Image: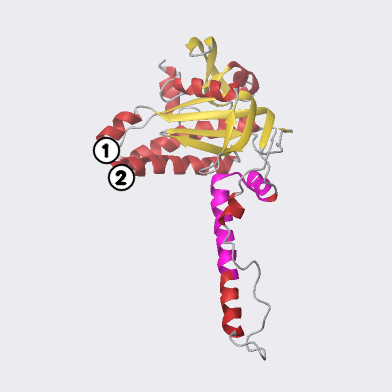
Amino acid sequence: MPWNTTGAAPRWSPISAAAPGPCSAPCSIPAGSPGTAGSGARAQTCCSTSCARDRALDESERLLLNVLPAPVASRLKQSDQVIADGFPAATVLFADIVGFTGIAERLPPADVVVLLDRVFAGWDRLAVRHGVEKIKTIGDAYMVAGGVPSPRADHAEAIADMALEMGAEGTRCAAESGQALEVRIGIDIGPVVAGVIGRTKFIYDLWGDTVNTASRMESHGLPGAIQVTERAYERLGARYELRRRGRIEIKGKGPTDTYLLIGRKGKERGTDPRDAQVRTR
């Protein structure tokens, strides 16, 4: 279970900020009441204002759920306190499109955005399918986590299964776009801190050594491969096939033992292009 560190400081609420202020309730004066000249017009105006307010609230909530996890959005609507939680165990994944800077330099701007959108939309669908939480994108990097904001016992397995499908999704997008795409993925498991920050363009984000190490696993990984830490190897080893890559120098951490996630044990091999890539290394 997460430990809650909700602070006492009030924060800006996107729901209250989006709602129009005038006319907090529909006008109670019925149209055409005796002795109330113009009351019909007033009632109609108040009703229209109330409907506009309701539409604004609905739109605000829809937008809020598009940028925040549903449980976090619900808490934010109910309280104006700072949201910050600690999770003793979560799985964090970073994915990156190898050589994307060069691709972006060769393509027109619109094609670059369309390509990224196609890849990320596919990964978004995978995140929903596996019940994990997309955290954010940074350039051509994609971050997702399992076990936050709602703890789950199989957070590591959910992220591992998604990771194993992300390469194939990238390959599909590459075929559609005519671009050669390779995906590099890094995973770590451990404690994280999560919360909502910002007053404008707010975001639900994660912090901690687990996040930094997962990012390093990706940036120091191999094209077309999924690199994981030793603690991820220990967690996944019973159900998944992993191969020791060896001890490599990781920025900020020094020599580190790393492993490559190949697939689930017992599954037929040879259908994932990563298999051939890893065998040749």
Q: Nearer the viewer, residue 128 or 73?
A: 73
Residue 36's place in the image compared with 78, above or below, is below
- Picture coordinates of residue 174, whole percent (x, y): 35, 37
Amino acid under label 1? Leu
The reply to whether residue 212 is in sight is yes
Residue 71 is covered by the magenta coloring:
yes
Name the image quarter holding the N terminus: top right
The span picked out in magenta is 50-77
Q: What residue occupies the far bottom of the structure in this picture?
A: 34
> Element at badge 2?
helix
Instruction: Name the image quarter holding residue 158.
Output: top right
Do the residues under discs 1 and 2 have CB atoms within 8 angstroms? no
Amino acid under label 2? Ala
Residue 278's place in the image compared with 130, above or below, is above
In this figure, which residue is indicated by the disc labeled 1? Answer: 107
- Dot 2: few (<14), some (14–19), or many (≥20) neighbours within 10 Å? few
Q: Nearer the viewer, residue 130 or 85?
A: 85
In the image, taking residue 138 as reference, residue 78 lies left or right, namely right
Name the image quarter holding the C terminus: top left
Q: Residue at x 55, y 61 (%)?
A: 56
Q: Residue at x 56, y 56 (%)?
A: 18
- Picture coordinates of residue 215, whole percent (x, y): 50, 24
- Picture coordinates of residue 49, whole percent (x, y): 57, 70
Magenta part, dominant SS:
helix
Q: Residue at x 58, y 53 (%)?
A: 17
In this figure, which residue is indicated by the disc labeled 2? Answer: 110
Figure coloring: secondary structure
